[in-house]
Image: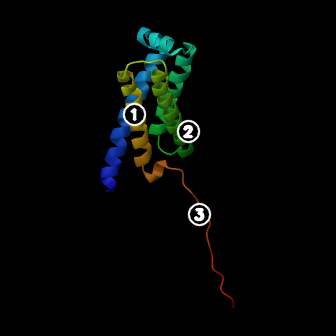
């Protein structure tokens, strides 16, 4: 069971990383199609730089070992970004096919987060309980 979970985690995480890196680069280089997309959604073009940098940094955080708290922030950022993208496309009446990318990345984010190994989670320290016996 552990091997299956590890495989699911890495497949989802690698596909998520590929998606975030590719869309982050597209936004950083301000491809014409992405600029038109942002204009259609009513977002300022400078937001592409912010999102692009955050996607690249979030991917690094998700892929590096340890850094559990930073990973949680990255996963949360990916979740909010993809939900925001999907809702934005719905709000402006874009065709349903435009939801595919954001929703796929959202699902990959959820799977990656859900199947991450214990070494990539925040360790919850439980207080030690001691029972004192009377002498």
Q: Is residue 70 left or right of residue 4?
A: right
Tell me the SS state at disc 3: loop
Marks 1 and 3, Cα distance to the nearest angstrom? 32 Å
- Residue 114 seen: yes
Badge 2: residue crowd in 10 Å (few <14, some 14–19, many ≥20): some
Quarter holding residue 134: bottom right
Residue farthest to the bottom, as pictured: 135
Q: Which mark is residue 16?
A: 1
Taking 76 as reference, is 124 above or below it? below
The quadrant of the image that shows the C terminus is: bottom right
Of callouts 1 and 3, which one flags the residue occurring earlier in the amino acid sequence?
A: 1
Q: Which mark is residue 79?
A: none
Residue 92, given in percent of the width and then of the height, sits at 48, 18
Marks 2 and 1, Cα distance to the nearest angstrom? 15 Å
Q: Determine whether label 2 and label 1 are within 8 Å by CB.
A: no
Residue under numbered circle 3: 126
Say which residue appears at 35% left-offset and 22% top-offset.
Answer: 97
Residue under numbered circle 2: 73
Residue 80, given in percent of the width and then of the height, sits at 52, 33
């Amino acid at each position: 069971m552990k091997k299956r979970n590890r495989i699911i985690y890495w497949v989802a995480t690698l596909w998520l990383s590929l998606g975030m890196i590719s869309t982050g680069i597209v936004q950083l280089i301000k491809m014409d199609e992405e600029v038109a997309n942002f204009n259609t959604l009513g977002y300022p073009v400078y937001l592409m730089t912010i999102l692009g940098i955050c996607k690249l940094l979030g991917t690094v955080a998700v892929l590096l070992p340890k850094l559990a708290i930073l990973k949680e922030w990255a996963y949360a950022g990916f979740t909010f970004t993809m939900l925001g993208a999907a809702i934005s496309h719905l709000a402006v009446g874009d065709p349903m096919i435009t939801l595919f990318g954001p929703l796929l990345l959202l699902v990959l984010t959820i799977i990656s987060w859900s199947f991450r190994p214990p070494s990539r989670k925040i360790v919850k320290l439980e207080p030690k309980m001691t029972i004192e016996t009377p002498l």
